[in-house]
Image: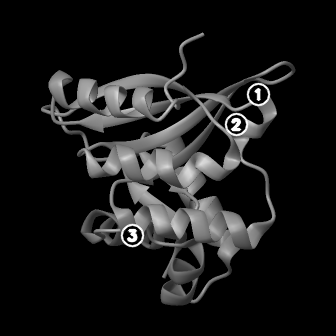
Amino acid sequence: MDGTQRRSEILSVLEAAEAPVSAGKLAAKFVVSRQIIVGDVALLRAAGHEIVATARGYLLEQKEETAFVRKIACQHQPNQTEEELSCIVALGGEVLDVIVEHPIYGELTGNLRVRTQEDVKRFIDSYKRSNASLLSELTAGIHLHTIRCEDEKALEKIKQALLEKGILYQG
């Protein structure tokens, strides 16, 4: 299989996937190295395909015209991350990303795509195993999340719950 055909097949896999697909799984499927897959995805992105890289793998961005998407500002300690994410998804929100303002690099964004309690558990387990720092640790816990939910009313419920937990940033 040549590169063009493989990239077409990668798109087909991502279109059919209900969860992120890791570069390792794609590499095994197409019997190439993980680095070849990373390069293929870069070429697909350059060609205009909306492929998102998450900690769990790649997914094809689904355009949901009916979805309500807004950013919220939060501030909390690292040990409150699970509480924050669980609160948002329990109220019907999906946490698309985390954004911090870095003094040298400007805006840094990490794709999360957390929409279920299982996603929260997976993220927290990965965080604990990795010994890595959260992006929010770079900014004294201040960060933004892009939230996708049903409507403005759902977002207001999420914001109120985070406010009650002392997590919604008030400045």
| Direction from residue 81 to residue 155 in the image, left or right | left
Is residue 44 visible from the viewing direction of this image? Answer: no
On the image, numbered disc 2 is attached to which residue? 136
Horizontal side of 138 relative to 164 (left or right) equals right
**Mark 2–mark 1 CB contact (< 8 Å):** yes
Rate crowding at label 3 as few (under 14), some (14 to 19) or many (20 or more) other CA atoms within 10 Å: few
Name the residue rendered at 35%, 34% in the picture.
161
Q: Which mark is residue 139?
A: 1
Q: Say few, some or many: other residues with alpha carbon within 10 Å of mark 1 (under 14 / 14 to 19 / 20 or more).
A: some
Q: Secondary structure at mark 1?
A: helix
Coordinates of residue 126 in the picture (x, y in percent): 63, 69
Q: Nearer the viewer, residue 50 or 121?
A: 121
Residue 139: x percent and y percent?
76, 28
Name the residue tied to disc 3.
118
Three-letter code for the amino acid on which mark 3 is drawn: Glu
Q: Is residue 140 above or below residue 58?
A: above
Helix or strand or loop: what does disc 2 sit on?
Answer: helix
